[in-house]
Image: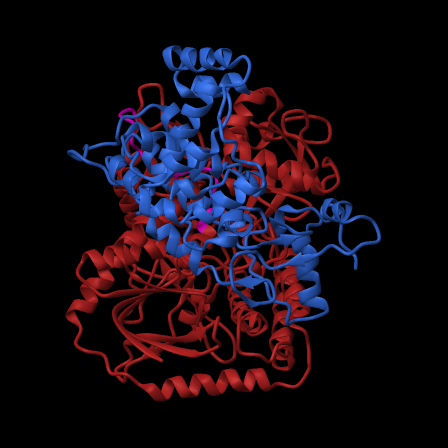
Chain colours: A red, B blue
Amino acid sequence: MAEDYDVLVVGAGLAGMRAALAAQQAGCTVAIVSKVYPVRSHSNAAQGGINAALDEADSWESHAYDTVKGSDYLGDQDAIELLAREAPAAIIELEHMGVVFSRDEQGRLGSRNFGGASHARTYFVGDFTGQALLHVLYEQLVRSGIMTFSEHFVTRLVHDDDGRVSGALGLDMRSGERRMWTAKAVILATGGMGRVYEPSTNALICTGDGMAIAYRAGAPLMDMEMVQFHPTTLKSNGALISESARGEGAYLLNRDGERFMQTTAPHAMELASRDVVSRAEQIEINEGRGVDGCVLLDVRHLGAAKIMERLPQIRALALEFAGADMITDPVPIRPGMHYEMGGIKTDVHGATPLPGLFAAGECACVSVHGANRLGANSLLETVVFGRRAGEAAAAYATERGPVRRSPSLLDDESRLLNLLLARPDGIRPAALRQEMGQTMTVDVGVFRQAETLRAAQAALVEMRERFARVSVGDKGRVFNQALVSVLELDFMLDLALAVVAGALAREESRGAHTRVDFPRRDDAHWMRHTLAFHTPGGPRMETMPVAVTRWQPTERVY
Amino acid sequence: MDVPDYGTVLDALLAIREGVDETLTLRCSCRSHICGSCVMKINHRSALACKTKLQAAQERAGSGHPIVVQPAGNMPVIKDLVVDLEGLWSKVRAVDPYLQPTGPVPEREYIVSNEAMLNVREATACILCGACMSECTVLEVDDRFLGPAPLAKAWRFTEDPRDGADRARLEALSQPGGVWDCTHCFQCVEVCPKDVRPMDRILELRRRAMAEGFTDNNGSRHSQAFVDSIGSTGWLDETRVAMRSTAGLRELRGWVGVGWRSFVRGKVPLRHRPIPGAMHVRAIFQRAAANDPPRQVRRREQ
C-alpha cells in the first residue's frame, strides 16, 4: 500500500507531534508514523521539567550562557541563543494547550532549581513533566485530525532520482504488510538510542532507528561520542531517579556519609552539571568510597510532606526497585547511560544536509547540548526545534513539485524483509544485543581511553559480521516483534560503531567524553564537531568548527 | 529461570521471549510504569507487568501454582498478550479530550491556584494503559459505555478552571454510554496503577451534571427517585423508583417483565410503609440539605 503526503513525520513523541502540528498549521497534509502509540513514546520518562527564562529576574542570555557552559563550549551558540530566546513562548504555549504546570502562591507558573542552572528556571508538573506534556500534545494531535500510523515501523528512506528524500518504507506491525509513504519532506523524530548500551535508563523502544536510517541514507551523525551518563540511576534495573530530587535539595553521600561534591563543585555541589557529578561519583566508587558499586542519594531532610508532593513517582520507583523508602532511607544510585547529545546533524531549521530530510529531538544534533546536556533542556529542545523543523519542512514541501512514486522500491524492501525472515536458525538477536550493550558500557563509559576503545571497535566489527547469522525466531506476519527487534539490532550496531569512532577521534576530554589518555580539554584543536559518514567499511570521520557567537571558551567551574 | 529479587512479571516475560520462545508477543517499553504499554491480566487481575513484582505475583498465585498471564479483558486479542486498543482510543477521542478555553487568550500563563492544578493533576496522572477498561464490569456487557479512563479524562477538563466548555461536556456525558452507565463496582479504582480513581471522577461528574440541570435522563431521575424514597420512608420503594427512573410509559413497558419477575419473587411489596425510625433518616437528609455541601458529607462518611 502507498500513501501521499506533503510532510511525513517519523516518531510521535514530543518533537514529532510538535513538528506535525506546525506543518499542518502551515497548510500541509501531514502524516505521523510511529512504532508505538503516541502516548507510549519515551518523552514520557522526562520527569524533572522544562527550562525557560520566564522570571523577570532571569534572562534568556543567562539561560543561553548556562547552556553553553553546560555543553563545555561544544554547543553551537547560534542554536543555543534561539533555544533560550524561544523558550518562554514555548512554555506559555504549552500552558495554553492545557499542561497543568505547578503554580506559585500568586497562581503564576512556579519553578524549581536544576543542575547547571544559575536561576530557578525549570517549570514542572510534579515529577512527571514529560508525561504531562506528551499527553497534552497528544490531545492537540487528536484535535488536529492528523493521520497517525501507530505501530508502523519505518525501515528506510526513499530518494527521488535527483537525490532528494521523498518518503519512507516500512512495515505495518499489526498486519505485517509492507508500506510506502510518499512525501515532499520527511521529518525524523525517533528519539534516542539508549539501548545501544546495557544498562540504560532508556525505554526498550529507544533503538535509534531514525539516526540509523538517516545515516545509511547519507546524512552525517554529529558528536556521537557525547553520551550522557545520568548521575542518579538505580543499580537493580538502571531506572532513573530524576534530577528533581537534587533540585529539591537531595545530598549525595559516600560510604563515610560525606557530601563528596564539596571537593569537585564547592559552589553548585549536587547541582553541578551531569557530567561533573557522574565523574565525581565514578571516582568515589572506583576509589573504594562507594557502597556496593554505588553512592547514596539522601532526601530524608526534606520531610515526608515535600517528598510526597514533589517527588511521588521517584519515591515509588525507589521503593519498588531498590526497596528503599526515600522518606526514611538513602537510596543507592550510580551513573547510568541516559541520553545521546549527538545525532543527525541539522541546522537551526532542523534541515539535515540531505535535501528533503529534517530531524528534531534527541535523534537530531542541532547542536544545543554540545558535550553535556543540562537537565530540563531536552523537553525544551523537542518543542522548540520540533516546531521549527515542522515549519521548515512545510516551507520546503510547499516549494517542491509533485514527487514521483516508485512502487518498485516497495517490492525491493519486501524482498529484503522476506530474505531476513527466511534465514535459517542461527544466533538469537537478544544475546548479541546484550553483548553489544555490555561492551559499550565497559569500554565506552564514563572514562575512556584509546586501548579499550580500539578493543570495543574490534569487538563491534566482529559482532557486525556475526549479525549476518542472526535469525528471526518468529516466521509469522502478524505482530512479528522478533523481526522488528532484528531490524533494530541492525540499526544499533551501526550506531555503536559511530559512537566508538567519534570517541576515538576526539583526543581530548570535554563534557561527557573523558579520555584518560587525553585528560584536558583542547580548545586549540577541538572546538570542533565530529561527523560520521556511513560507508560499507565503517564510519568515515570528518570535523567542522563549533559556532561561537559571544561566549569564548573558559574554564568550567561549578 | 533465574530472575532477581526485584524482578517483575515483565522481566520474566522478556526472559522467556529472549531465551525460550521468540514468538511470545507483548507490548512493553519503559519498564517503569509511565508508558502504559504492558497492561495484561496477571492472576486474573488487570495490571502493568512492569509494576507487578514476580514474588508478589507468585504469592498471589499460591506456591507451586503457575502465575497466570492473559491478555487484557474487554478488548479483542490480536496475538498472545497484544489486544486491539482501538476501542480505548476512539472513546478517548469521543470526549473531546483537549482544553477549550473561552474568552481572550492571556499574553502570559492563565492565573490559577496551585490547588486547582493539583486537583486536575490527580487525573492527568492517567497514562491511558487501559487497565480500567480491561477490568470494567460494564464494558464486559455493554461496549457502548465510554469507560473509566475516557471519563476520568473528561473530568480533568470539567475541573480545569481554564476550560470553558463545562456545560457542553456535562451535557454530552449525560447521554447514554456516559456517566450514568457506571455501576460503581470499584474495579477501576482497584486496578488503576496511577491512583486516578476513575469511578470517583465519574460520580463527581454526575453530581456536577445534575447541578448544571442535566436531569432529563434515566440516570439522574433514578438517582433523585432513590434519594426521595430513602428520604421519606427510610428504605427503597423499588416500584416507584423504577417508574420514576424511566422517561415515560412507552419505555416503562419494556420493564414489565422485570417488574413481574420481581413481584413473583416477593421483591415488590404491595404497600411501601415507612420503616420504624424513618423520621431520623428524614432528619439526616434535612440537615444534609440545609447545611452541608455534598463533598463535606462525603468526607464525614469516611
Q: Considering only vertical position in the picture, is B265 above or below A534?
A: above
Where residue A229 appears, x then y in whole percent? 56, 47
> Bounds of the magenta span?
A43-57
The residue under the point 52% across, 85% down is: A418
Residue A136 visible in the snapshot: no
The residue under the point 36% across, 74% down is: A168
The residue under the point 36% across, 48% down is: A381
Quadrant showing the C terminus of chain B? top right
The quarter of the picture where residue B114 lies is top left
Q: Is residue B220 left or right of residue B10?
A: left
Task: Work out whether residue B126 or residue A81 is closer to the camera in this orientation and state it.
Answer: B126
Q: Considering only vertical position in the picture, is B56 above or below B298?
A: below
* Magenta stretch secondary structure, dominant: loop
Q: Is residue B140 left or right of residue B180?
A: right
Residue A190 visible in the snapshot: yes
Task: Work out whether residue B165 or residue A5 is closer to the camera in this orientation and state it.
Answer: B165
